Amino acid sequence: MPVASERLSGWLSPKWLVSGVALAADGLLLNYDLRLGLAATALLAVVVAVWLYIALRYGSLSGTPSVRTALVERSRQQEANRLRAAQRSAAQGGADPAEGA
């Protein structure tokens, strides 16, 4: 069953953790060698620009509803329906469908 991503990520989203590590590494490279640090900064800027373009065009920042969210909600609804059906069946005496044959 699909699980909502809020419960998976906890208090820190992985994209922010990766971004923080990338910025820290860039800072270390800038401190070690200016030209190497500037090259890493340029590469990081290109990666951020590509990610931003994709996120704005196709992804979470585009404003389109997430397919995954709809799938998680439908799965929760089906689980609730199964639970209600099991409770109704138990309340009616737990009639076994195999007994009718």
Image: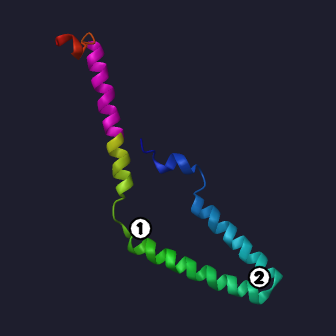
Most distant residue in the front direction: 101
Kindly state the secondary structure of the residue where label 1 is placed.
Answer: loop
Q: Residue 96 falls in which quadrant of the image? A: top left
Q: How far apart are the alpha carbons under marks 1 and 2?
A: 32 Å
| Amino acid marked by disc 1 | Gly
From the viewer's perspective, is residue 40 above or below residue 95? below
23 up-or-down from 91: above or below: below
Q: Residue furthest bottom?
A: 35
Q: Quadrant of the N terminus?
A: top left
Q: Which secondary structure dominates the residues rendered in magenta?
A: helix
Q: Per the image, is 78 magenta?
A: yes
Depth order, front residue of 1/59? 1
Element under disc 2: helix
Q: Which residue in the protein does label 1 denote?
A: 59
Q: Residues within 10 Å of mark 2 (few under 14, many from 20)?
A: some
What residue did someone put label 2 on?
Answer: 30
Q: Residue at x 72, y 77 (%)?
A: 26
Q: Find residue 38 and name its label.
A: none
Residue 60, quarter of the rendered image: bottom left
Does residue 38 lie above or below 28 as drawn?
Answer: below
Name the spot of residue 66 as percent of width and height, x first.
37, 58
* Residue 72 in picture, x, y percent from top left: 38, 46
The image quadrant where one finds the C terminus is top left
Identify which amino acid the numbered label 2 is placed on: Leu
Q: Which residues are magenta?
A: 76-91
